[in-house]
Amino acid sequence: DVKVTQSSRYLVKRTGEKVFLECVQDMDHENMFWYRQDPGLGLRLIYFSYDVKMKEKGDIPEGYSVSREKKERFSLILESASTNQTSMYLCASRVVGGATDTQYFGPGTRLTVL
Amino acid sequence: GDSVTQMEGPVTLSEEAFLTINCTYTATGYPSLFWYVQYPGEGLQLLLKATKADDKGSNKGFEATYRKETTSFHLEKGSVQVSDSAVYFCALSDWETSGSRLTFGEGTQLTVNP
């Protein structure tokens, strides 16, 4: 089974801290994604990556950056956490095209910024 | 651009009732269509998918048919169970316009009462 793991299920940080959210997938997928999920707003794409060292902005990249140094790992970085970044963060990886086209999600990290 | 519209929730049903969650889409290409489910406290997982017009996806008693003429992909189940309580997301993948990104609907909260 494909597994996407996220480093923490729950995280509490203070305003201004630098926050790292880690995501690892074990299926050699080229495409990886970071979303945030908020009540009433659905899933919003922050950043995605289609290859090592490649990144693309999603719909709400402001206040975030990403790093993909290895194919299996995609990190989301909050450079200076703010209270409006309190949210559920979901990582995903995807194999594109054909019968096996599926996007797999991690369990999520619920981040609270105080 | 591409978009997905789901029926507004929340939806509350009694056990063994018939379920329909409507999903319509707008796309310029020939998208693949997906339904994802999110159980409480978890990430999203693929429920079913269809890659071309008139395909029917099915899984765990749920079904959805890709209707190009009505640009729809409605989710149905003949008899829901309490364990089906979750949030359901309709999504599309249109490689020509969005590459590897999925476009998600807002999600529909389903609660099934005993």
Image: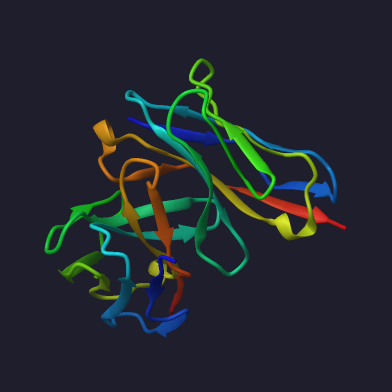
User: Whole-percent x and y of residue B66?
Assistant: 52, 28
Residue A4, position in %: x, y? Answer: 39, 69
Q: Nearer the viewer, residue A27 or A33?
A: A27
Residue at x-position 61% and y-position 62%: B39
A113 vs B59, nearest the viewer: B59
Give the farthest residue toward the top: B69
* The C terminus of chain A lies in quadrant: bottom left
As drawn, A9 above or below A35: below
Q: Give residue B96's quadrant in the image.
A: top left
Q: Residue furthest left?
A: A53
Query: Which residue sits at x=62%, y=66%?
Result: B40
Up-down: is B98 above or below A94?
above
Residue closer to the observer: B77 or A107: B77
Q: From where the camera sits, is residue B106 visible?
A: no
> Height in image: B94 above or below A53?
above
Picture quadrant of residue A111:
bottom left
Q: Is residue B109 left or right of residue A42?
A: right
Image spot of residue A19 (x, y percent): 29, 79
Can residue B15 be spotted in the picture? yes
As drawn, B64 above or below A5: above
Query: Would residue A28 appear left or right of B103 to someone viewing this image?
Result: left
Label total for image:
0
Q: Residue at x 25, y 70 (%)?
A: A72
Picture colour scheme: rainbow
Query: Where in the figure is residue B87, as x and y percent of width and height?
Result: 61, 53
- Tell me the quadrant of the picture where the N terminus of chain A can be found: bottom left
